[in-house]
Amino acid sequence: MVTGNEADIPGYDYSAQTITRSPLNVEDLDLLKQTVLFTEEDEQYLRLAGDVLEDQVEDVLDVWYNFVASHPHLVYYFSDSEGDPDTDYLERVRERFKQWILDTCRRPYDQEWLDYQQEIALRHTRAKKNETDGAQETPDQVGLRYMITFIYPITSTIKPFLANKGHSSEEVEKMFQAWFKSVVLQVALWSYPYAKEGDF
């Protein structure tokens, strides 16, 4: 089980028939997992991380949202043509972001998961950004350079939360490394729509 309230999350349509199938298959995914050294042990420690993080997701999102809010070049992607943050848009995205934490830890990395990574990717590009949340005035694409560099903040800031439940330093480190590998893997997948045909 991931959570019990996915149906209440605005714009969250994991496994929906409307999701575009990923141009990659599970064999492609396996090669990417090998490249980032993602193993069955990492899957095990991600599940543990999900248990550790489940009641901390609001606090995690507070850290991430405060980080974005403190950098105008990042909050820009959630702002209208006057430069004012679209609070409704930010709140809807936040709900999906919370679920993403749990999905990262608990969903099987299968074709269905791979397809949803493509959906997330498209929602950062001109293909679908703003469409899900009706955010008409915000920029229509997130710069790929910020997608990539955001790997570090959402990785480095997770470790203190992983250490909050009394696990050994070795267990915390293994959860952290599994999280790090998964984030790199997902951002690699999210870069697909930015690549020219045949370049990915």
Image: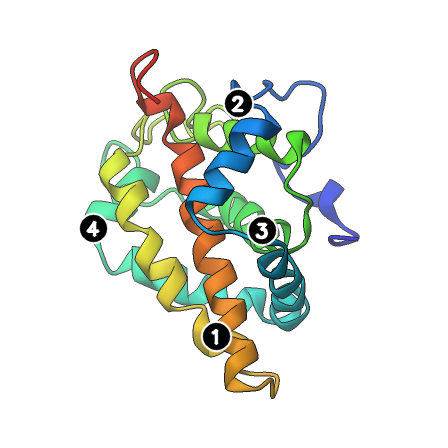
Instruction: Give the labeled residue for mark 3.
Output: 104
Q: Earlier in the sequence, mark 3 or mark 4?
A: 4
Asked whether disc 1 touches disc 2, contact meaning CB atoms under 8 Å apart, the reply is: no
Which residue is at the front of the view, 101 or 59? 101
In the rendered structure, the answer to whether residue 13 lies left or right of residue 85 reads right
Outermost top residue: 197
Instruction: Give the labeled residue for mark 4.
Output: 72
Instruction: Give the labeled residue for mark 1.
Output: 173
CA distance separating discs 3 and 2? 18 Å
Q: Nearer the viewer, mark 1 or mark 3?
A: 1
CA distance separating discs 1 and 2? 30 Å
CA distance separating discs 3 and 4? 27 Å
Which residue is at the front of the view, 92 or 193? 193
Asked whether disc 3 touches disc 4, contact meaning CB atoms under 8 Å apart, the reply is: no
Where is 121 relative to 78, above or below? Answer: above
Q: Could you tell me the amino acid type at mark 1?
A: Glu
Callout 1: SS? helix
Callout 4: SS? helix
Instruction: Give the labeled residue for mark 2.
Output: 24
Mark 2 is surrounded, within 10 Å at the Cα level, by few (under 14), some (14 to 19) or many (20 or more) other residues, namely some
x then y, percent, for residue 109: 63, 41
CA distance separating discs 2 and 4? 34 Å
The answer, for residue 165, to whether it is visible in the render is yes
Q: Earlier in the sequence, mark 1 or mark 2?
A: 2
